Amino acid sequence: MADRPYQRQGRTRPYGARRSSMTVQETGPETGPETGPETAPDTATDPAAGSAAGSAADMVTDMATERAMAAADVGLWHWDIASGAMHLSATATGLLGGSPATLQDFLGLIDADERPSVAAAMAGIENGLDIGVRTVHGRHLRARGRLSGGEACGILIPADAPMTEDRLATMASAQATLREREAHLTSVLETVPDAMIVINSHGVMQSFSAAAERLFGYRQDEIIGRNVSMLMPSPYREMHDTFLRRYLETGVRKIIGRGRVAVGMRRNGSTFPMELSVGEMISGEKRSFTGFIRDLTERHETQRRLQDLQSELIHMSRFTAMGEMASTLAHELNQPLTAVASYLNGCRRLLTGPDTVQSLMLRDAIDRAAEQALRAGQIIRRLRQFVARGETDRHVEDLGKLIEEASALALVGAKETGVHVRYDLDHRVTTVLADKIQVQQVVLNLIRNAVEAMQETERRYLTIATAQRPGGMAEVSVSDTGPGIPPEIAAHLFQPFVTSKPQGMGVGLSISRTIIEAHGGQLTAEPNPGGGTIFRLTLKAIGDDLDKEEADDGV
Amino acid sequence: MASEAVVHLIDDDEAVRQSVAFLLATAGFAVRVYDSASAFLDALPTLQAGCIITDIRMPGMDGLELQRQLKARKVTMPVIVITGHADVPLAVEAMKAGAVDLIEKPFSDDTLLAAIAAAIDRHAEHAARDETIAAIRQRMAALSPREREVLDGLLAGLPNKTIAYDLKISARTVEVHRANLMTRMGAGSLAELVRMAFLARSAG
């Protein structure tokens, strides 16, 4: 429990430390919550604090009031019913003649005769409390209090102390204002999507927002008062106290005011990436720290998936580059191999005449040599087939989802480039037969090319559309408003190692076309009427709707 | 498998041209080589008919375009395509363009020679059939209008009497026309006559 969340020179009120209003302070405003007929000590009448308009902060910082209350023997007490913990202000401790930590301790300080009735009154605190008690030291006191939330608080005053109606009303009004502010602040904090945790200088949690409850899986009431390191996995868990202490000693800020990515641990032991920003509050000699935490799980997922796709794409491009090389090699090597085989076969045909041992051996050797030339051709053919086939894994896929995923990945960071993205999906085309990863690579490739193409242009509109095409095909088009493709490039656009990008390998479109053609579709490019380029790819469409439409078209 | 047929070999690779020409020469073929499709087309008017063997991927005009050109010029010589890049779409294109065969490089002599033999045989067969059809058409064209009418009746399967009635001539006259047209067409029987007429009509 925070022992002194607001105090004399309090400049700021701890952010969201809503519990703190219930804590007992020597001179806090949480005095008698109920007005009573008794008279209050005629001290510390502060008009500003007393007026209904006077803010709670005024009240809190009113040192005159604080001193006055202490001087007037007004003690404060606080009882947390859930934990049973009790706190008494110094004045209350003085009046009672002891500093009880629990209700039992408290009752132990009450005269044995009165103990049962006081215990009963405390048990019935929800009805309000206003009793006279005699301490074990024989002092007559008056205890007043009421229940608020899961906590009870009130005042302890000498039984003979006068208490004016006025004074009590003032205190009650000040407290009501304070509560109202606090409720307001709490409601604001509840709506902040980021989780918020306030710790004190020892790392002990003071406040735990609703979002934090959702994120970490702990309830506020079970986590307040525990060390914040419990929300971190090892080795950070063990190191946190040291970090905190080092900061307090050196004042060198590592995280505060900067924010960084850290790892959090949920109640169930699972960990997650989070973005942590920490603010520091200094009130008098007290410090507390507020951490705002944002769950990065989803963002990390996205990045991880993007990386996966990219590495797949790199793998594919190597594979396809190999294919292109095999294809070129095949042509080049097949020519000399054809010549070798043809010469040898011609020679064998010339070796006619009487069979001698030598001529038989010669014919046999020539035969075998020709076979080897053909074998070399077979090896090249197999290599090409292997490369051309690749690994495909075709299933019926939801085209919209396929595009959505691919574009989400492709457009990471595109917002910063000021590209306006429009989707124009034909609801009649829903499913296609495709190797999802491969086709996503193509779509991703086309979108990235489009975004890149528009870097230098003023109008940046990217349109991703689907449409139905004859022959049971679905079309995906990606249009940009970039500068378009120069004619000298356009003629060789899909050939490998042709590129207009300084850093490009010139394999992206070549691979893309290979993939789409392997799917039985086509990949083409054409100028966008409004400037720029449109790439279109087709895939085999699946689905009743399409078949029906087609049948209708055919009539 | 010697033959009087000439093999026209088109390939941009000199080693391939020379080696294949050598092989074909050992097999008894007369071979003429061309280093490009356009060189072949240039020489075409003076060429002896025969079989064409062409590569597909060549600088300038490729093998597929050559096939289209030949079709446009109504050259009926059979075309065998040889390629170092046989994949399915290419094979389909080549066959659609009218190639009689597609052979992957490198190839065994048997494969190539068998393909040439088949192409030449088929071509000869076609040529013979074309000749027959041309002769039949010529003879049919020489028939008199009345003989044509009688022939139509016979092809429709009508008896002499019905033909006579339809043409408003006597049955005896129909018989005379029929005998004459059989002689002119060189048909020994009605069945043969029908077969000839069918052949002439079917081959567009």
Image: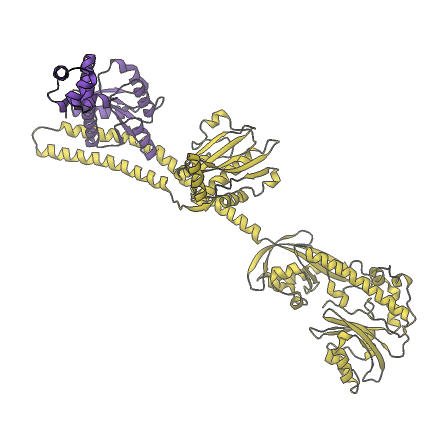
In which quadrant will I find the C terminus of chain A? top left
Judging depth in this view, the residue of A443 and B2 nearest the camera is: A443
In this picture, is A394 found above or below A66? above
Asked if one can make out residue A116 in the rendered structure from this viewpoint, the answer is yes
Judging depth in this view, the residue of A80 and A246 nearest the camera is: A80
Compared across the picture, whether B60 is left or right of A64 comes to: left
Chain B painted colour: purple
Letter of the chain in yellow: A
Compared across the picture, whether A34 is left or right of B47 comes to: right
Q: Position of residue B125 (x, y in %)?
A: 18, 24
Compared across the picture, whether A104 is left or right of A384 comes to: right
In this picture, is A5 found above or below A382? below
Judging depth in this view, the residue of A152 and A395 nearest the camera is: A395
Q: Position of residue A87 (x, y in %)?
A: 76, 73
Q: Position of residue A531 (x, y in %)?
A: 56, 28
Q: Residue at x 90, y 76 (%)?
A: A161
Examine the image and state in which quarter residue A14 appears. bottom right
Examine the image and state in which quarter residue A424 appears. top right
Asked if one can make out residue B126 in the rendered structure from this viewpoint, the answer is no
Q: Residue at x 54, y 30 (%)?
A: A532
Compared across the picture, whether A363 is left or right of A265 comes to: left
Judging depth in this view, the residue of A303 and B123 nearest the camera is: B123
In which quadrant will I find the N terminus of chain A? bottom right
In this picture, is A295 found above or below B15? below
